[in-house]
Amino acid sequence: MSEQLFFTAEAGFEAARQLSLRPAGHRDNTLHGHSFTANVRVAPQAFRAEYCGGEVGSLRDRLARAIEPLDYAFLNQVLKNVADEDIAYWLRDRLELSDVDRVGIRSARDAGVELTANGSIRFWRKYRLETAHQLPNVPPGHKCGRMHGHSFGVVLHVDLPGSEAGIGYEALDRIWAPIREQLNFACLNDFPGLNNPTSEVLSSWLWQRVQPQLPQLARVTVFETASSGAHFDGTHYRIWKDMTFDSAARLKYAGAGDPRRRIHGHTYTLRLHLHAELDRHMGWVVDFGDVKELFAPVFKLIDHHPLYEISGMDDTDVANIARYIRQQSRSVLPQLERIDVYEAEGCGAILAWGERIPAVLV
């Protein structure tokens, strides 16, 4: 697949609302408020930045202006309908951008919606499992061969036409409740089908139990840690690994009065996405530890360095950083299919060349 580039930005707003479509007595029918987060992902041709390399800043500014009427507002006085998906539709129209790939609204840390490019709604809800496990097939001495535990995060993603969006979070909660009752505060290895409970195996095990009850299930995501995990969409396994690097930058195309033309820096978040056939014996796509080890030589090229002095990096904006990382990683991580580079939370570039581009992680 040819390479695709997206820019992404997010911004928050504080607002109150009252939902009237819930069943009688539902708490959402009372006046309440949220710390909302809005995010948007667009292709480069969707807008014109002030200069090459300034796309993330331009998109972030545009998003902040778009949500300004919602900040510290009573949403029912601004929008006709105020559910998360209604806010996403309103925001997409207000942004007035072509080629918008995703618009997301998160009304809580563990729940949100995404409006996709084709107009469908993806609901997601994140749950937590406190469990123990051990991996029986790892080599002797591997730390995961010992019994240990994780606070797993599990995200269920559901794709729905806009007309069906109302079934949302409550349906997910009902389906999840007996699964949580079974797995929480337990050892995963004790359950049939989880004798080798890697994140990949757990994601497919959960899919097999949720999808028959909810055919619209699009993906199961398992956070093994805050910085690594796996996806399963019914067919394909994917994993990701996060890391941060602290480097200096200087955007050479910024205007003379733009501070980003000066030497400055960020604590960047780098997210590597990998896709391969599941190793049926090991139960994983690639060991998370191996990803870090194999990527270490590339990481050393960018961490604690002035990026503008690195040969082969055209400029130090996030898109060019992602392109440089891809070029340097071709031989060491052939399973790599997507690279995210964020200069601030939710604000960065996504470079993808795989068959499918997963939604932004939550």
Image (cartoon, grey):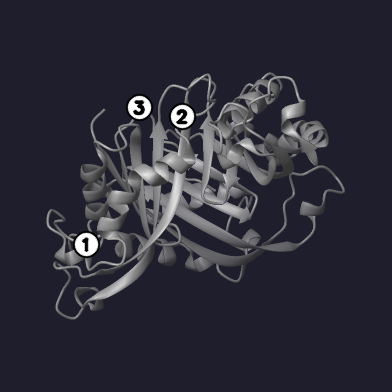
Q: Position of residue 209 (x, y in %)?
A: 70, 23
**How far apart in space, not on screen, are marks 3 and 2 (Cα)?**
16 Å
Q: Is residue 176 left or right of residue 84?
A: right
Q: Is residue 313 above or below residue 205?
A: below
At mark 3, the secondary structure is loop
Q: Nearer the viewer, residue 177 or 152?
A: 152
Q: Which mark is residue 316?
A: 1
Q: Which residue is mark 3?
A: 355
Residue drawn at x 83%, y 36% as measured from the top left: 181
Q: Earlier in the sequence, mark 1 or mark 2?
A: 2
Q: In the image, what residue occupies the spot 40% across and 39% down?
A: 273
- Which structural element holds mark 2? loop
Observer able to see residue 70: no
Locate residue 353, reporting x and y percent.
29, 34
| Disc marking residue 285 | 2
Location of residue 23 by image quarter: top right
Dot 2 amino acid type = Val
Q: Disc 1 vs disc 2: which is toward the camera?
A: 2
Q: Residues within 10 Å of mark 1 (few under 14, many from 20)?
A: many
Quadrant into which the N terminus falls: top left
Say how many tags the image has. 3
Of mark 1 and mark 3, the one earlier in the sequence is 1
